[in-house]
Image: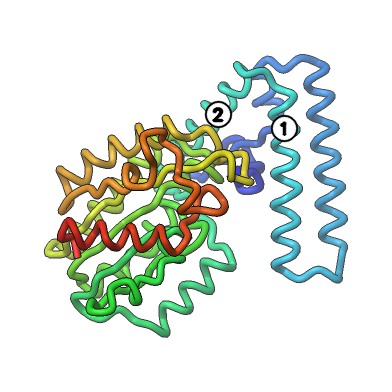
Amino acid sequence: MLSFFLLAFIVRGQAQQKQSLNYYSDVVLNKIEATLDQRNSIKSIRSELDLKLSDIKNNVGLSVDEIAAKNKQVYNEAFLKYNAVLSDEQKSMVKKLLFEVQLENVRNGHGTFHESDHFKKRMELFKTDPLPKKAIIFLGNSITEQGNWKSLFPDKAVYNRGIGGDNTFGVLARLDEIIESKPEKIFLMIGINDLGSRQWDNTLILENYNKIVDKIRKGTPKTRLYIQSILPLNDSLLKGASYRNKADTIMKLNNELQLIGDSKCAGFIDLYSLFHHGDNILDSKYTRDGIHLLPDGYSVWMEFLKKNKYL
């Protein structure tokens, strides 16, 4: 779902300050020409949200992880209610405003990156399994994290640097460890959370991809960097509504990633085509939740890399 809680603070600061979009602000409501009825409904949604957040905060029996999960849930519920109040044209305007804020942050050197508890735990775990020189690294989000790469490639020095929930900003923020190890190969797959839970535009994602590629190329020029396509989704199995109806967007992004992979990297690896049968839907035999792969899916992935002599 959209990380609404990371964006609902200030509308604008000074030129070089980080900016955020407050969906409930008069600035936004004026720009989308919200009616009086819409404003009243949105005000009610905001009041309900604040009340729920207060109840969660005051519940001393909740753990830190439980508080975070409940906060995310109520923010996502509020965002869905907010969206339901708006017309399609207004939702498009809000999306455009959000993109403008994100793009301005990128241009001012501010990443929209949030260190989740899971991110921190994975980073601590990586310290206990340091990267040797000339390793092979799988880099990405939960789809990468859930791959048992050492078992899939037992004769290779393969290391898993996947973090569930990660996005292009997160990868960019944690490249130093990888670059310092001067790996032989990097297999990068990132972006589905940018499109889904973050609702970021392809232009922003591609800007980050170019930054990631450029930083790796500069820091370890002999490393063979492969960009792996974003996988298809299966909407009928997805629980998160924000990930649905992304097929066209994913295909367009993959087309752009292929250009980057072919022109600036060791190559582009089309896994998207591998996991659907002409319908742009992730084959249900490879997934239970519409986004993550079952073990058979990783076996297909592994065989494809071997067959095409990537590994």
Identify which residue is drawn at 49% across, 55% down.
292
Residue 248 appears in the picture as rendered: yes
- Residue holding disc 1: 24
Give the mark, 1 or 2, whose residue is nearer the N terminus: 1
Identify which residue is drawn at 31% across, 48% down.
271
Q: Is residue 284 above or below residue 122?
A: above
Furthest residue in direction left, as rendered: 222
Q: Position of residue 204 (x, y in %)?
A: 40, 38
Identify which residue is drawn at 82% across, 26% down.
41
Q: Position of residue 261 (x, y in %)?
A: 21, 46
Element under label 2? helix
Kind of residue at disc 2: Lys
**Is 265 positioned to the left or the right of 238 in the image?**
left
- Residue holding disc 2: 95
| Quadrant of the rendering where the C terminus is positioned | bottom left
Q: CA distance from mark 1 to mark 2?
A: 14 Å
User: Badges 1 and 2: C-beta atoms under 8 Å apart?
Assistant: no
Element under label 1? loop
Q: Is residue 295 above or below residue 22?
A: below
